[in-house]
Image (spheres, helix red, strand yellow):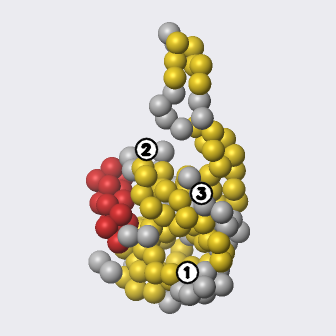
Amino acid sequence: MCLKNISEMKKTDDDIIVYKFIKVCGKKLFTPYYGVKIKIGKTYHSEIVINNGYVNLPFKYCGNILIETQTQDYINVGLHSFKNYEDALNVSNNYVVNWNKKGIIVKCIIPKNSIYYDGIFDDGMYINNLPSIVSNTIKYVEILN
């Protein structure tokens, strides 16, 4: 999961409510991309890594020679979440259809005084341009479905 079109670094003045798609395996919960085991009620921390060089589509070609691409900063390491429940649900449904895995949506909080970036989600395959956040701290609060 990558966050594109990232904002400047921000610090939360208050808690921010966000939503995460979580993979279910038996009675255990895991993040879908890195497979980190999580527990409801627990707070997690991560570094945030900003990379450069994400290639935006479409490419411009002359014949079969690539003549123009665009690059921009992106974040692939950090605690990714969605701003909207519906977007998290959309990703969950897509994950179930394409990967035959069960997923749930969890309400989370990015706690006051956390570092975060706004941007858009891009999984590089199925879903793009969803308003998202990457933060250095997140608390898993409640299973919603």
**Left or right placement of residue 45 versus residue 81 in this view:** right
Residue at left 54%, top 74%? 37
Would you say residue 36 is visible in this rendering? yes
**Quadrant of residue 90 within the rendered picture:** bottom left
Judging from the image, what secondary structure is the residue with disc 3 in?
loop
Q: Position of residue 58 (x, y in %)?
A: 47, 31
Residue closest to the eye, 23 or 67: 67
What amino acid type is highlighted by mark number 3? Ile
Q: To which residue does mark 2 refer?
A: 125
What amino acid type is highlighted by mark number 1? Ile
Q: Position of residue 36 (x, y in %)?
A: 56, 69
Near mark 2 (Cα within 10 A), the count class, few <14, some 14-19 or many ≥20, is few
Q: To which residue does mark 3 refer?
A: 6
**Left or right placement of residue 79 versus residue 143 in this view:** right
* Residue 110 disc label: 1
Residue closest to the eye, 39 or 83: 83
Near mark 1 (Cα within 10 A), the count class, few <14, some 14-19 or many ≥20, is many
